[in-house]
Structure formats: structure tokens, C-alpha cells
Image: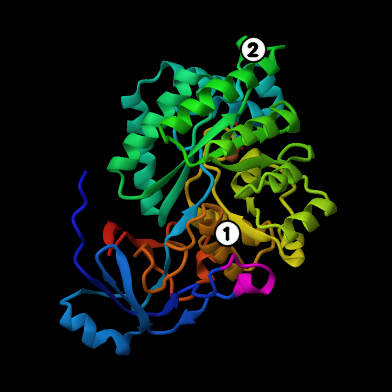
């Protein structure tokens, strides 16, 4: 769909304007708390970009000259749109049956071994058409926008063979063309071993490496490549082979690491120069130090811990204290984290990971942008960046996690266009 240039907008008098402006580097340690708040702040957009950010008074004249549409934000917090850097958006059906089985005492891994879990989602995807997969994902994307997310990473992974993985990538491409939000495609090349390859894991890895990855790279269908490196999934050697094959063809690695067990996946991510290592529940002290010395973004997904009913959460405080780059994402998927609400993830990060509201907001915006290698365009409100911003129905940013599990979002602006509003 050709996008026409949106008319200029003038967000006036925000109770708090969280700019998250700063040096173009990922936020570590104490810098994670620096939201750079402007009271009575204003933002002036032009086309899909931010033209100016400052005190409202200093922008009035230019806004008038441009005939910008004024939006009064007197009682609101205005901040960058959330950057959700880890989702499995495209799937068919749901896994509400697994959910109830878990509530009755089965574990995630027991259900997976019995043919539920990722395998059952793959069966559903196998039966679904591109049309129906896109239709379901489109409905979720509307909800992402309504909850203030403006950029969404989207993984494949429920295909489990070449044709089905390509089908998922075509769904993502179709959604990219039509959605107001920016979607960032990731080939989740190793997610679960298909039942038909039981006992022949090496063969499956070979097919992925020699057929799937080149097909995807040739058609430029993905930007990143990911692997689920864990007990019951794939080992470090298999993941190394696959990530290296992807990297050779221009796909940037990221990795599901240390979610269920400690495997050494984080160190593999560092070795591969991954954009991010995600989950990190079972990190060792050595991993934490290594992450802190690296540029790999430590992406925490507390929605999965919450939904699985776990008592323990990833060690956010230790990561921040060590100086690692911490980001937050939803992990939106049918099995372990069926939430697309980054505001709720921010609440979980505060209550369960003991992050401060400021740290959690920076982790959910600017550091998420670094995890997607897009921090030059998104993640903060600064002149020249994309006009991706949200207006929230609170006058103190700490109320975002404090009043938990409600949608505070009044308006979502993506590339300068209003894509959701209940003002
Ligand atoms: O990020 N860990 C692997 N992948 C997903 C869960 C997939 C599923 O259970 O469907 C995750 O938690
Ligand atoms: Fe995931």
C-alpha cells in the first residue's frame, strides 16, 4: 500500500515528555535510568519524522507556521513507542489446552515430549492457509498498536520444514506491506526437531543449513536468524552451525538462551556477535560478566515466566549492576507468553525483576531498538528519528507499571500517522 505523507502533528504540553535522548549507544548501568524528561514538553512531527522536540512554548511558532494539528497532552505522558524485539507473532490456533494441562500439574517440557507444545502449533500452521495466518496475525497487530507498540520483531519457527517456514515468511512479508507498524523478520531456523526427524537431528540441521537458510537469504525474506538452544531443543554445536551459515549469507544472529537449562548458549551468542541473547533465566556469573563486556543485548522476557507460573525470574539486577545492555520484550507466542502488552511486561519487570520504572521503560524502548539494530531510527524522541510515539493516560511515568494490567495508551503514532486513538 503506498503511504502518503501524514500531515504535521504538534503534541503540546505533555505532563512528562520522556525523550530518552542521549548518546547513540546502548544504555548500561546507571544510564538505563536516564529518561531525559521534559516537563510541559512538546513534539512537532513532519512527514514520518520528528522535526523538533522541546518545551512547548519554544515550538508554538513553528507549529503555527506549519499548520500542524495540535494534540493537547496536558494530563498525559508522551514517550517513544514500545519496541518489542522478540515475538512469535505468526501462528495458528492457540495453546489453551496446554495451558490447562499445566494448571493441572504437567510441565512445559512434559507436554512438549507428549507431542503438544511447539509440535502441535506446527501441525496447526501446516493446515492453515497464508490467508488465515495473516488474518489472525493482523488482529494481533491491531492490539499491539492499541497497547503502544510501534515496532515488532516477528519470528518464524512454527513451520518446521522448508515449505512451511517459507510460508510463514511470506505471511510476514504480506503483513509488512500492509501494516502501519514496522515488522522485523527473523528466521527461527531451529525451534523444535520435527517428529519425522527423531533420531536424525544431524540430517535436519543439514537441511536447514544447506536448503532453508540459502532460500531465505536469496529471497531476502529475513533480517535475523535465531535458534532455540536448550534441553529438549537444539545443542550449542547445532546452533553454532546454523547461526554461522546464516551469518555468512547476511543474516544477523540472535539466540534463545538459558531459558530452561544452562547450555552455554549465551557464550555462543557472544562468540557469534549476536544482536541479542534472549530469556537468560539460568545465566551463570561468568555469563553475566561476559555479557557485560559484549554488545549482545540481554533481552528478558518475564511474560513467559509469568504465564508458565514460575517462581524464578531472570537476574535483571545482576545484569544491570554488571553493565550488560538489558532489554525487555513480550515473547508473544501461543505456548509460553500469550501477551502482546509491553506495559504489562514493564510492570512484571518492576515487580518481579526489581527493575525501576525508569529502567524498565528504557529497556522496553531504546535498548529494544539496539537489539533490533535500529537505534539510529527508533527508540527515543529526537529530531530526525521516526515519529513513533505514544500518549498515555497517566501524568507520572511510574504509574505505567504501578496501575498494572490496564491499557494506559490513548494514542499511538507510527511514522507520523495516528494508527490508534481513543482521545
Ligand atoms: O520463546 N523457547 C522457545 N520458543 C518460545 C516458546 C515456543 C512455544 O512454546 O510455542 C519461547 O518461549
Ligand atoms: Fe521466544
Quarter, ligand 1: top right
Callout 2 secondary element: helix
Estimate the spatial distance between the alpha carbons at disc 2 and disc 1, rounded to whole Å: 41 Å
Q: Is residue 421 left or right of residue 28?
A: left
- The residue that label 1 is drawn on is 347
Callout 1 secondary element: helix
What is the x, y in percent for residue 36?
Answer: 51, 79
Up-down: is 126 above or below 279? above
Residue range corresponding to the magenta coloring: 25-33
Q: Is residue 124 visible in this depiction of the protein?
A: no
Q: Is residue 397 magenta?
A: no
Identify the image quadrant of residue 418. bottom left
Mark 2 crowd level (few <14, some 14–19, many ≥20, 10 Å Cα): few
What is the x, y in percent for residue 3?
Answer: 21, 51
Mark 1 crowd level (few <14, some 14–19, many ≥20, 10 Å Cα): many
- The residue that label 2 is drawn on is 197
Mark 2 near mark 1, Cβ–Cβ under 8 Å? no
Q: Which mark is residue 138?
A: none
Q: For marks 2 and 1, give the one nearer the viewer.
A: 2
Q: Is residue 31 magenta?
A: yes
Seen at 47% across and 57% down, the residue is 374
Question: Dividing the image into 4 quarters, which one contains the C terminus?
Answer: bottom left
Question: Dividing the image into 4 quarters, which one contains the N terminus?
Answer: top left
Up-down: is 219 above or below 271? above
What is the x, y in percent for residue 405?
Answer: 51, 55
What is the x, y in percent for residue 422?
Answer: 28, 60
Identify the image quadrant of residue 230. top right
Amino acid at each position: 500500500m503506498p503511504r502518503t505523507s501524514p500531515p504535521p502533528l504538534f503534541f503540546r504540553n505533555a505532563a512528562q515528555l520522556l525523550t530518552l535522548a542521549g548518546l547513540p549507544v546502548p544504555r548500561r548501568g546507571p544510564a538505563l535510568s536516564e529518561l531525559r524528561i521534559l516537563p510541559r514538553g512538546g513534539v512537532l512531527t513532519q512527514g514520518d519524522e520528528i522535526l523538533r522536540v522541546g518545551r512547548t512554548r519554544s515550538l508554538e511558532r513553528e507549529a503555527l507556521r506549519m499548520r500542524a494539528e495540535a494534540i493537547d497532552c496536558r494530563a498525559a505522558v508522551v514517550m517513544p513507542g514500545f519496541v518489542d524485539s522478540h515475538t512469535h507473532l505468526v501462528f495458528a490456533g492457540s495453546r489453551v489446552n496446554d495451558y490447562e494441562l499445566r494448571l493441572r500439574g504437567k510441565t512445559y517440557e512434559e507436554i512438549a515430549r507428549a507431542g503438544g507444545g511447539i509440535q502441535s502449533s506446527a501441525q496447526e500452521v501446516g493446515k492453515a492457509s497464508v490467508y488465515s495466518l495473516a488474518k489472525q496475525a493482523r488482529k494481533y497487530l491491531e492490539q499491539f498498536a492499541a497497547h503502544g507498540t510501534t515496532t515488532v520483531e516477528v519470528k518464524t519457527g512454527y513451520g518446521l520444514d522448508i515449505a512451511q517456514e517459507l510460508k510463514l515468511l511470506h505471511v510476514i512479508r504480506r503483513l509488512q506491506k500492509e501494516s502501519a507498524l514496522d515488522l522485523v523478520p527473523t528466521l527461527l531456523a531451529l525451534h523444535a526437531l520435527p517428529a519425522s526427524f527423531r533420531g536424525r537431528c544431524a540430517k535436519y540441521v543439514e537441511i536447514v543449513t544447506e536448503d532453508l537458510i540459502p532460500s531465505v537469504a536469496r529471497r531476502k525474506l529475513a533480517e535475523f536468524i535465531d535458534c532455540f538452544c536448550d534441553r529438549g531443543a537444539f545443542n550449542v554445536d547445532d546452533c553454532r552451525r546454523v547461526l554461522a551459515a546464516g551469518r555468512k549469507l547476511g543474516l544477523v544472529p540472535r539466540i534463545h538462551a538459558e531459558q530452561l537449562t544452562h547450555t552455554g548458549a549465551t557464550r555462543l551468542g557472544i562468540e557469534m556477535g549476536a544482536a541479542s541473547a534472549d530469556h537468560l533465566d539460568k545465566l551463570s556469573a561468568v555469563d553475566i560478566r561476559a555479557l557485560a563486556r559484549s554488545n549482545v543485548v540481554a533481552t528478558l522476557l518475564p511474560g513467559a515466566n509469568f504465564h508458565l507460573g514460575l517462581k524464578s525470574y531472570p537476574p535483571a539486577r545482576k545484569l544491570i549492576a554488571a553493565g550488560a545492555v538489558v532489554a525487555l520484550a513480550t515473547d508473544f507466542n501461543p505456548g509460553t507468553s500469550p501477551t502482546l502488552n509491553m506495559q504489562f511486561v514493564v510492570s512484571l519487570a518492576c515487580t518481579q525483576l526489581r527493575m525501576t520504572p525508569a529502567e524498565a521503560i528504557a529497556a522496553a524502548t531504546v535498548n529494544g531498538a539496539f537489539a533490533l539494530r535500529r537505534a539510529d531510527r527508533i527508540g527515543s524522541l529526537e529530531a530526525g528519528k521516526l515519529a513513533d510515539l505514544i500518549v498515555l493516560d497517566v501524568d507520572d511515568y511510574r504509574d505505567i507499571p504501578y496501575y498494572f494490567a490496564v491499557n494506559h495508551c490513548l494514542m499511538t503514532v507510527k511514522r507520523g500517522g495516528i494508527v490508534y486513538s481513543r482521545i
